[in-house]
Amino acid sequence: MKKQKLILAYSGGLDTSCCLNWLKDKGFEIICFSANLGSEFSPKELRAKAKKSGAFKIYVKDLRKEFSQNYILPSLKAGALYQNKYLLSTALGRPLIAKYLVDIAKSENAGYVAHGCSAKGNDQIRLELAIKSLAPDLKIIAPLRNWELSSREEEIDYAKKNNLPIDSTKNKIFSIDKNIWGVSIEAGLLEDLNNRVPEEAYILTKSVHAALKKPERVEIEFQKGKPVKINKTTLTLTNIIEKLNKIGGRHSIGRTDLIEDRVVGIKSREIYEAPAAWILYKALREIEELVFGKEMLEFKKIVSSYYADLAYRGLWFYELKNSLDAFINKSSNKLSGKVELELYKGNIVTLKRSSRYSLYEKRLATYGKKDLFCRDWAEGFINILGIPLKKR
Ligand code: ARG
């Protein structure tokens, strides 16, 4: 009998290595897919690992550009921030990975896709909801939800027994997901809320103590909500993000420690590092403050909050999210301008902002001479506002 084809989202880590072997034993022909979204990545190593673990074929793709343009940028423009502390790095990567799983399944004529997400996490939800949106008939297998292995130790034993190439030297203490938009760190000793985050948990950022002793200025230019230059140099969005991760990292920018409400109802502790994401998020809000009227700012808050929630819950390809994109794109047309920030010991301080669409008018705001504001207007205005108050 001909084997059924299955596309596996593969990282080369312990979980997906075990998944590969387990699925192969179930009789599937496994085609792996690995996406580079900005993690430590060696395509050569991955290919070798996948082959050694029994994959029939592997696709390795550098998706940083598409990730920046179609997932990070919309979220940045939307001002999406989950529970005040999470700029959604992991969450934004999942629908992109799902899209490629679906595309490869189509081109390979495969009826199955599989992933190595756990039954407790958000990522299974994001991947599967995206797959259901894009290819409702594709069958999804999540080995971690139904295999017999119940702990990391058992997985390691299983890997050894089956001769799978795993990194046993690197005694992994945390569960880490890294891409260009940020790093998510969880599990291990972080599960005890009495434990401080040990310095070695962080990848992108220096501690406040070890941060540079001198402040550093950075100017960011936006066009229609998109960052296009830093310090007057035009760069691709991916390069801007990678550069700001370096700059922000040395000033301890963008660390958060969140007791997070997962989709599955559990509260969990998640540590995030997102220097570039925080710098760009703050900078773009400065432009908004300058350009948007009060009603736009208020309405945008609602949109941001919905957007973050939809992205977090994996509803990326959902109608409401697409409609919010339409609002965001339209309203971002005037978000062009420059922001100069100073980074110092974990702080981002705004020094200057400007935009040709600015609603700020010094001659109206001034308490000095050359005031355009007509003092006579105020009394009548207050009288009208006061009508119901006087009546009461
Ligand atoms: N809690 C975050 C989210 O749901 C990150 C999960 C990623 N996993 C990890 N291994 N840290 O988006």
Image (cartoon, rainbow, N blue to C red):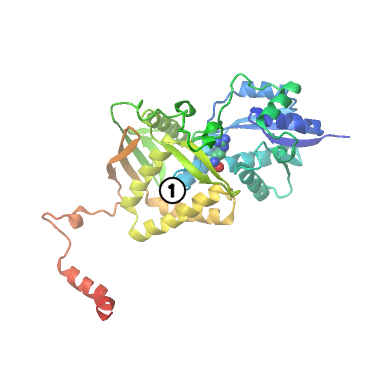
Which residue is at the far bottom?
A: 391
Q: Where does residue 355 sit, x and y in percent of width and height?
A: 30, 47
Rendered-image quadrant of the C terminus: bottom left
Residue denoted by label 1: 79
Q: Where does residue 122 sit, x and y in percent of width and height?
A: 59, 44
Q: Is residue 92 in view? A: no
Query: For this rendering, which residue is in front, 173 or 132?
Result: 173
Which residue is at the far left?
A: 369
Residue under the image location 36 percent in, 61 percent down:
295
Circle 1 packing at 10 Å, graded few (<14), some (14-19), many (20+), is: many
Which residue is at the far front?
A: 194
Query: For this rendering, which residue is in front, 382 or 295?
Result: 382
Classify mark 1: helix, strand or loop: loop
Which residue is at the far top?
A: 169
Residue under the image location 17 percent in, 62 percent down:
373
Q: Is residue 24 left or right of residue 360?
A: right
Query: For this rendering, which residue is in front, 344 or 103?
Result: 344
Rendered view: 180 above or below 77:
above
Q: Where does residue 84 sit, x and y in percent of width and height?
A: 44, 47
Disc 1 residue type (three-letter): Gly
Q: Where does residue 219 sit, x and y in percent of width and height?
A: 32, 36
